[in-house]
Amino acid sequence: MRYTTIGDRSVSALCLGAMQFGSTTDPDTSLALLDRFVDAGGTFIDTADCYQFWVEGGQGNESETLLGRWRRERGITDEVFIATKVGAQPTIPGAGLEAQEGLSTKAVTAAVERSRRRLGMDTLDLLYAHREDPLTPVEETMGAFADLVERGHVRELGMSNHRTWRLERARAAAENNGWPRPRVLQYRYTYLQARDEVPLQASGHRFVTPELFDFIHSEASQGRDHTLLVYNSLLSGAYTRPGRSFEYAYDHPGTQVRLAVLDEVAKETGASRNQVVLAWLLDHDPAIVPLVGVSSIGQLDEVLEGVDLRLSADQHERLTAAH
């Protein structure tokens, strides 16, 4: 396992996504996956207070509830770093993101109390603003987040799926008011590059863009480092699973060029496409922490082996240069 740092905490450089745990991935399998991940040295787990409200019969608290059970039954404390998100849970049963709870002070404060209770954590390791709330000023959300840190309810702050200008608003609000700044960012990204102008099938998802990379580099030059997590990094199995097609946003000539180089490197290393993609992400500049969702021990083991794969400088450059 490789490791990185968030604030003063060392965490695994691979983050296990728990979105499906306790719902589409049954509890017994979910618990086994968590155990296997930790046994392999994994210490970073991602969830949200709305996972998975969109599944038939789902309430949106299944993942956090399952993680809370696992922590309690296994005696898990500070050795595992758990990130959760607020803002996207519908306020109306059966509704979708059009009824999201949002990021007002009232909504954030109430949501964090529920997450702390479900997870069994006095202090949440990392709290994200899950997605944009156009009805609430960024400054209000950052003020609510700062209050939660001061009260000891949250340690680290993050933002997920926000436009870059909103990240700058958050940075400025933190600096102007002496508040803790969001140091962790979460967006969608993988080896294949999507066309920016094509809308994604999943509502609310935002890609890592060249502008975001520029923001991260610029901030680092001013002494403000960020940790960047990327989800959907293996495209829901499309790299390796027969019959699983790539989303339309990847339907352009550059995809086939990249896949050809990916297959060359996979053959050279004896690794799977998924493992090469993970190795490429782990050696990215700026640094990236892949967030991976799995539903079986076999899938998890493949991912864990990918973390240990080391590409040569030539292989990484060939993968990056393909377009």
Image: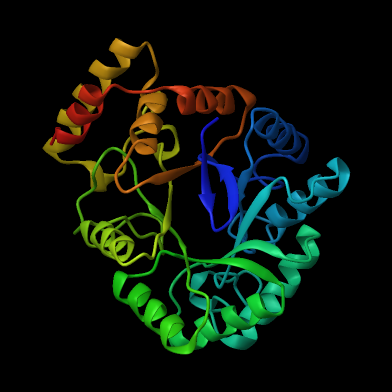
Q: Is residue 108 above or below residue 297?
A: below
- Percent coordinates x, y for residue 31 in the rendering: 75, 37
For this view, does 236 lie left or right of residue 71? left
- Percent coordinates x, y for residue 274 in the rendering: 40, 27
Nearest to the observer: residue 180 or residue 135: 180
| Figure colour scheme | rainbow
- Percent coordinates x, y for residue 34 in the rendering: 70, 37
Figure quadrant of the N terminus: top right
- Percent coordinates x, y for residue 100 in the rendering: 54, 75
Q: Is residue 4 above or below residue 224?
A: above
User: Number of labelled discs?
Assistant: 0
Please give the name of the residue rendered at 59% of the width and 73% of the height, measured from the top-left corner. 90
Q: Is residue 210 above or below residue 315?
A: below
Nearest to the observer: residue 40 or residue 234: 40
Please give the name of the residue rendered at 75% of the width and 71% of the height, measured from the top-left corner. 114
For this view, does 257 lie left or right of residue 141? left
Figure quadrant of the C terminus: top left
Q: Please indicate, yes or no, whether residue 318 appears anywhere in the rendered image.
A: yes
Q: Is residue 109 above or below residue 216?
A: below
For this view, does 17 lie left or right of residue 287? right
Please give the name of the residue rendered at 72% of the width and 66% of the height, measured from the top-left corner. 115
Name the quadrant containing residue 254. top left
For this view, does 242 lie left or right of residue 40? left
Q: Please indicate, yes or no, whether residue 52 appears anywhere in the rendered image.
A: no
Nearest to the observer: residue 4 or residue 101: 4
